[in-house]
């Protein structure tokens, strides 16, 4: 059975993987077919009809094919090869990022070659119509991945405001809001949020869909396929029983319906069940469904300040017993913040042993948790430093974008990382680099691993204007270019400011003061 389960999970991972402006110092050069190969004849400040940065401030929810096409395809030309020069390719466990040229085949979308700057090989492959991006010693990294989001609820926060800032009011707001949703409404809001996220460098998104809102589940499953066809991003959908599974008649049937409808993972929320016995039973049901349908597990777990909420241990035990390590996510786990030392050590050991990935959502957790405290107020995030120190792979999610729980956000996962380094005291240089690694490596685990930047692989990467991960995190700067399957799907300009007549790049450290 366990061997069959691993086979099913591998097959599911394969299926999931199958679904799926230049700044002031960056140059995008296009060699027209009338010019000689290798001759630069033009320079462009932006690409296409819209820069990705403009999409961040657009509230349009148009879903016409023309709008989708202009966003995902107008910035690149699949008939042209693409050359990234003077790039520093990111790698784990080092600060010495090698300088390379990267050539991408326009027809296949694959990386043709990665060559040293001074190599003669770096000049080959120059053809008519070649696009050239001068990275100017900026980092090239895998794209960001988002492991925890609620696309069915995005952009509803203006109408359904969480005045108390509590998790309880957020859930109550959503309970009222979801009854009046239409498929078009869900699709339009989700599409806007996805474009924001792609502009910020996130091209893989796992969203939860409340199984108590069938309209939302069907809409997000439909959107998953349309976004795949547009090649804008990879979307995974989790069937999430927001109101619990055994809390009322019909909830279990709603979850089963969503799983049979083709979601990528089965969700749960054990701390919301009526008793500990029913919480454990709900988790067994979730794992049974996942095994039966060959999909993954992704539960909201112990999202509370209550130190007695220890359902994570149940999730880890089921994962270990069924051989599902690497296919199970436990989101939030905020109760661990309040565990005693021995209890936290037991939970972290179980996470490491089982292969469960904990995903923290610092923007929401820092706001929603600790609301019942006087002083001192707990921060409410799970124990990220200790989980990392133990050797577990921790994911980092945005969770909410202007929704009934959380009123802020533009879909930039760098904001979540920025909050994490503050709230969890991860401000050492090595610690901040490790947080950046979460975005470009650990977050890709639910999607089968991060794209590799090497010859023969599909060209899926970000071109940054900065060469240090810590600077990217510090300035929360969006990537200059987002490359997906060899095409430029988004670009960002980084305008300078003028102070007393002097043009400055805000936050960018001058060499003389480093």
Image: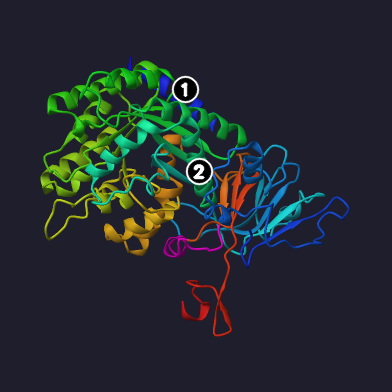
Residue drawn at x 82%, y 49% is 128
Left or right, residue 97 beside residue 175: right
Q: Is residue 467 magenta?
A: yes
Residue drawn at x 39%, y 18% is 293
Residue range of the region highlighted in magenta in the rendering: 464-476
- Disc sitting over residue 11 in the figure: 1
Q: Is residue 461 magenta?
A: no
Which of labels 1 and 2 is toward the front?
A: 2
* Spatial separation of the CA atoms under disc 1 and disc 2: 26 Å
Residue closer to the observer: 435 or 293 = 293
Q: Residue 427 appears in which quarter of the rendering?
A: bottom left
Residue 196 percent across, percent down from the top left = 51, 49
Q: Secondary structure at mark 1?
A: helix
Residue 299 percent across, percent down from the top left = 30, 33
* Placement of 324 over or under 444, stated as above or below: above
Identify the coloring. Answer: rainbow
Q: Which quarter shows the N terminus?
A: top left
What residue did someone put label 2 on? Answer: 194
Q: Which residue is most to the bottom?
A: 500
Left or right, residue 313 beside residue 181: left
Residue closer to the observer: 126 or 261 = 261
Residue 182 percent across, percent down from the top left = 45, 31
Residue closer to the observer: 406 or 491 = 406
């Amino acid at each position: 059975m366990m061997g069959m389960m691993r086979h099913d999970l591998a097959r599911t991972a394969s299926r999931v993987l199958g679904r799926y402006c230049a700044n002031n110092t960056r140059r995008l050069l296009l060699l027209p077919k009338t010019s000689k190969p290798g001759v630069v004849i033009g320079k462009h400040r932006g690409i296409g009809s819209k820069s990705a940065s403009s999409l961040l401030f657009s509230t349009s929810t148009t879903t016409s094919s023309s709008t989708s096409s202009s966003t995902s395809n107008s910035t690149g030309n699949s008939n042209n090869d693409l050359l990234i020069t003077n790039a520093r390719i990111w790698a784990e466990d080092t600060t010495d990022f090698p300088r390379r040229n990267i050539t991408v085949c326009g027809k296949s979308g694959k990386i043709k070659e990665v060559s040293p700057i001074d190599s003669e090989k770096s000049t080959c492959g120059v053809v008519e119509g070649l696009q050239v991006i001068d990275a100017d010693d900026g980092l090239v990294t895998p794209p960001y991945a988002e492991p925890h989001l609620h696309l069915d609820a995005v952009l509803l926060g203006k109408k359904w405001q969480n005045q108390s800032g509590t998790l309880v009011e957020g859930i109550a707001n959503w309970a009222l809001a979801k009854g009046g949703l239409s498929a078009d409404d869900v699709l339009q809001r989700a599409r806007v949020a996805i474009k924001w996220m792609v502009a910020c460098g996130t091209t893989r998104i796992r969203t939860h869909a409340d199984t108590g809102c069938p309209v939302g589940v069907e809409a997000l499953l439909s959107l998953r396929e349309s976004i795949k066809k547009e090649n804008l991003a990879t979307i995974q959908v989790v069937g999430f029983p927001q109101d619990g599974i055994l809390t009322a008649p019909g909830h279990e049937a709603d979850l089963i319906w969503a799983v049979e409808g083709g979601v990528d993972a089965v969700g749960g929320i054990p701390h919301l069940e009526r008793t500990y016995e029913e919480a454990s039973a709900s988790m067994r049901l979730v794992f049974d469904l996942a095994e039966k349908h060959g999909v993954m597990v992704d539960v909201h777990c112990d999202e509370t300040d209550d130190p007695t909420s220890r359902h994570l241990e149940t999730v880890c035990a089921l994962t270990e017993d069924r051989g599902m390590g690497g296919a199970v996510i436990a989101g939030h786990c905020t109760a661990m913040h309040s565990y005693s030392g021995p209890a936290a050590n037991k939970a972290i050991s179980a996470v490491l042993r089982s292969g469960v990935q904990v995903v923290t959502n610092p923007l929401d957790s820092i706001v929603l948790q600790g609301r019942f405290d006087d002083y001192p107020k707990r921060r409410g995030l799970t124990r990220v430093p200790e989980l990392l120190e133990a050797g577990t792979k921790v994911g980092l999610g945005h969770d909410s974008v202007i929704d009934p729980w959380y009123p802020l956000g533009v879909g930039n996962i760098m904001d979540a990382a920025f909050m994490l380094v503050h709230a969890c005291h991860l401000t050492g240089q090595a610690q901040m680099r490790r947080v950046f690694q979460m975005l470009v490596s650990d977050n890709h685990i639910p999607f089968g691993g991060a794209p590799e930047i090497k010859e023969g692989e599909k060209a899926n990467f970000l071109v940054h204007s900065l060469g240090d991960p810590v600077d990217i995190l510090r300035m929360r700067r969006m990537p200059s270019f987002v490359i997906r399957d060899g095409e430029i799907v988004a670009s960002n300009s980084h305008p300078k400011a003028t102070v007393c007549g002097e043009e400055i790049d805000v936050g960018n450290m001058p060499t003389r003061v480093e």
